[in-house]
Image (cartoon, rainbow, N blue to C red):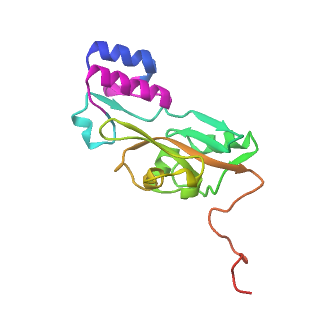
């Protein structure tokens, strides 16, 4: 990365946003879009740190600083950066008396890792932001499951590891905290059970 591009990227993400080995660490999706735009204008390749294209890319992008959380209480949605911890997500939702719909116990501490490993039910995920190995940002999903027309990229991203790209952000469905929709059917009689 040349000095002019480095200075331009530092103006977007801040001096602390460019880490060791010149890995660019945007703090939110808006900064990520600006970084990708600057790379496109400069004619240089960008790739996420986990992609195989990293050796050919001039700019490597990481997700460690993507920890912003935005709650849209009226729409029952929460957008979290891939670097967010589940503890922070639960706390932010609980502050609005909401909870992530159908969220079970996860092994991973971070949201992006949980999506990549397939630890969430599809109905919990309203959308994803993926950074492909080629450096393109894809935002997919909708407010409801019926909003998805064509390929269900958000559904495909769950459990895909980094094959489709690096998960940079996730939009989760919320419900009132008192609703407590189970992640999996618990013990007891359910509608449709015999007797």
Q: Is residue 19 visible?
A: no
Image location of residue 65, percent across then percent down: 48, 31
User: Is 181 colored magenta in this rendering?
Assistant: no
Image location of residue 63, percent across then percent down: 44, 35
Please state if 128 lies on the left or on the right of 173 as rendered.
left
Please state if 180 lies on the left or on the right of 159 as rendered.
right
Please state if 45 lies on the left or on the right of 176 as rendered.
left
Quick check: 45 above or below 152?
above
Quadrant location of residue 20? top left
Q: Extreme bottom residue here? A: 195
Q: Is residue 44 visible?
A: yes
Image location of residue 156, percent across then percent down: 43, 55
Quick check: 155 above or below 189?
above
Q: Extreme front residue here? A: 149
Image location of residue 17, percent across then percent down: 43, 23
Quick check: 45 above or below 38?
below
Which residue shows up at 67% across the image and 48% down it?
Answer: 174
In this rendered view, identify the residue nearer to me: 100 or 16.
Answer: 100
Please state if 119 lies on the left or on the right of 177 as rendered.
left
Which residue shows up at 32% across the image and 31% down it?
Answer: 60
| Number of dots carrying numbers | 0
Quadrant location of residue 67? top right
Q: Which residues are magenta?
A: 18-46
Q: Quadrant of the N terminus?
A: top left
Q: Quadrant of the C terminus?
A: bottom right
User: Is 21 colored magenta in this rendering?
Assistant: yes
Quadrant location of residue 44? top left
């Amino acid at each position: 990365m040349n000095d002019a591009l480095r200075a331009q990227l530092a103006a977007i993400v801040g001096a602390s946003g460019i880490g060791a080995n010149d890995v660019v660490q945007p703090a939110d999706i808006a900064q990520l879009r600006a970084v990708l735009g600057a790379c496109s204008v400069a004619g240089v390749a960008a790739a996420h740190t986990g992609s195989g294209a990293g050796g050919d890319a001039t700019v490597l992008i990481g997700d460690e600083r993507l920890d912003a959380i935005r709650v849209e209480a009226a729409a029952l949605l929460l957008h979290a950066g891939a670097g967010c911890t589940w503890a922070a997500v639960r706390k932010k939702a609980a502050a609005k008396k909401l909870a992530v719909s159908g969220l079970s116990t996860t092994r991973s501490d971070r949201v992006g890792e949980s999506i990549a490993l397939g630890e969430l039910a599809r109905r919990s995920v309203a959308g994803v932001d993926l950074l492909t190995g080629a450096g393109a940002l894809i935002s997919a999903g909708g407010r409801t499951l019926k909003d998805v027309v064509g390929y269900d990229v958000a559904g495909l991203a769950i459990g895909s590891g980094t094959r489709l790209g690096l998960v940079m952000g996730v939009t989760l469905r919320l419900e009132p905290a008192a609703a407590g929709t189970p992640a999996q059917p618990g013990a007891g009689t359910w509608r449709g059970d015999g007797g």
